[in-house]
Structures are given as C-alpha cells and as structure tokens.
Image: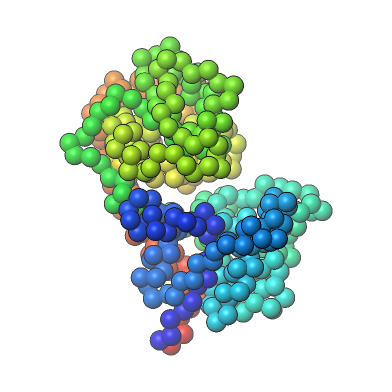
Amino acid sequence: MKPRVVVVMHSYLEGREALCEQGLYPRHHLWGLDALAAGGWEVRLVSSAARRSLLGWLGRVTGGRLGNFAQEWGAWRRLGGADVLYVVTTTDLFWLPLLRRCGLIRAKIVAWHYVPPAPAPAWTARGWKQSALIGRGLDGVACLTERAAAHFRRRLPLARVERIDWGVDTAMFRPVEPPLDGGFFLSCGKTERDLPALIAGVTGTRHQVRLVVPQTSLAGLSLPPNVVHAAGPRTAFDDRGASYPDLIARLYAPAIAFLIPLAPHPNNASGYTNLLEAFAMGKPVVMTRTGCIDLDLEREGAGFYVEPGDPAGWARALDRLAGDPALARAMGVRARRLAERHFSCACFGERLRGFLDRVCPPVS
C-alpha cells in the first residue's frame, strides 16, 4: 500500500523538533506528528524560512488577519502528491481553504480549532476568515473542546468535525519518587490568566506561591512576600527562559499543587497545557471554572475548582490541600492515572490517526 503523505503547518514547532528528539522539549507539542510517522504516513513539515522575505513582511503587517503568507506559500509548494494538509495553528490559514474550495488543491485540509472563534463583523478581515466561503474549504476540523466542535458542526455540515482530547508527554513529566515537598504552590502560564484574583486570595496567608509567567503579566501588580516570580520570559511571545528539565526539577516536582487562575469568560480554554502537565507530574490542580475544558476536576478527584474572580475561593482551596497532605497525594495519584489512561501522547496519537483515517481513508 502506498504511504499517504501529510503536509504539516505547525509554526509553533519550528526550531523545536531537535529539542523534542533530545528530550529537552515536550513531545506533546509535536501534536501527533511522531504518531503519524509511526503509523506509516510520510510527514512533510512546512518551514517559514521566508519570514524575513516579502511574504514574512506581509504577514507581520496584516497581523495574521489574512493568514500566514510564508507558511501558506511553503505549504502550497509542498502539496504535490500530498493527501492531507494538517494545520495545527489554525490562525495561519486563509488562502489555502479558498484554493481548496475552488478545486485548485487536491489534498484535503484538516485544521485544529481549540475554541469557537470570537465573533467578528463580516466586512473585517477576521470576519472573512470565519466566513463559510473559507470554512467550507476544510474537509476536517479537529476540536480541543466540545464547545468548538458544536460550533463547527453547525457551521460546516459537510466537514468531519470531532472533538479530540490532547495528550501530554508522560515520559518527560512524571512523578518523582520519593515525592518531594517544597512547601509551595506553583502557577504557570502565558495567556488569559487572572493573576490578580490568585494574588489577592493568598495575600496575608501562610501559603507560598511560585509564579512562572511572563514579566509583562505582572505589570501593575504588587506581589506580597509569599508570592515569588520564579521564572518566565519577558513577554508571552518570548519562549526564552528556563529549560523544561530545569523547571521540572526545580519547580514542578516539589510543588504541592498546580494553580491555574483563568480569565472569566466562557470560551477560555487556556490552561489546558498546564493542566495536563500537572496530571502527568502526579499533582492536584486548583483551577478557575470556565466551562470550556471538557473535564470535571472534582468529579475525577484530581483537584478543586474556584469560581471566577473569587480570591476567598483560592484561599480555601489552598487551605484544604496544605492542611491535608494525604488528600493532596491521593488527588495526585488519580491525576497521574488520568494522564496515563487518557491524556497521554500515545492516546492522542491513536485518536489523531483514527481521525485522519476517517477524513482520508487509506487506499489499497
């Protein structure tokens, strides 16, 4: 049987493939490319080497509202003989779905959507990207949340739309034996975080909190003595900073629990990465209830929810975990079990391969 060919647009991964192979960067950021290769697909990863060219300049000027010119041009050049174009960063798309809709691209297009796109007027560039004219150029939509899946099932009745739960690198992120106890809680994250509510909740308490956040996230905030900015890049768009092995050894492993304070809007699916990494580390999670991530922490016995904008709720949740180490350990055990049984890279790879098989069945 002839191997199928998948062309992959994944701008976030560029420059990190080698780090994944060396065990220095989490394999879940491959978004299943290793599973596709292991399953017999020929994988062609698109590079944005043209980002300093005119195409790269156009992309910066338009702010991505008309797609990622360099990425889409690179994908177009690699589509000869390909069966599927697999797009991980959906905001990069604009022109290729149009060409597919017009019959100028033979390869099917599968794109990720994490949450329903924010509404935009039809006459704006962002509104054009959300239009049926472009959307119907997609053959498959993989969704990280059921809310996104429901949205695209209504909008794109001819496309295959499925929710696919992501998976974490359970080899890199794993519990340390014997368990460490650094006596502090850990909060990581770059986007859509409600740090003011968390900081207000722990101010004046005995709870020690370490923050791994961009420096710009702390603008205008005053940290009490028990809250320390332990690591993080300068901005949310800067990936420089402590390495993953360093973060795991110094902060992840000894933390009592992971804290994920989220901005209070219903489509906020940020925090998913930190949630899965906490599970893999065998740590309980305290998280703002947003209603978008399709997992019930409390029903699974892996942590607690805090209502949006509730500083007192943060204090109560941390009191419970700090005051009952046996409870925290039991929650951590259940969290690790969830990671191993459902939220692992291996599980995700199987789900992704199945999805692409349904969108593009193998031909004998």
Q: What percent of the width, then of the height, locates residue 252? A: 33, 36
Q: What percent of the width, then of the height, locates residue 202? A: 44, 18
Residue furthest to the top: 204
Quadrant for the N terminus, please: bottom left
Observer able to see residue 161: no
Residue at the location (44% across, 26% down)? 229
**Is 323 positioned to the left or the right of 15 in the image?**
left
Q: Where is residue 362, by image quadrant? A: bottom left
Q: What percent of the width, then of the height, locates residue 209? A: 39, 24
Observer able to see residue 62: yes
Residue at the location (54% across, 64% down)? 47
Residue 155 sits above or below residue 240 on the image: below
Residue at the location (45% across, 58% down)? 31
Residue 134 sits above or below residue 251 on the image: below
Residue 326 sits above or below residue 269 on the image: above
Q: Where is residue 68, by image quadrant? A: bottom right
Residue furthest to the front: 52
Q: Colour scheme in the image?
A: rainbow
Q: What percent of the width, then of the height, locates residue 284? A: 34, 35
Residue furthest to the right: 123
Q: Who is closer to the viewer here, 327 or 227?
A: 227
Residue furthest to the left: 178
Q: Who is closer to the viewer here, 66 or 35?
A: 66
Q: Who is closer to the viewer here, 62 or 304?
A: 62
Quadrant for the C terminus, please: bottom left
Residue at the location (46% across, 15% down)? 224
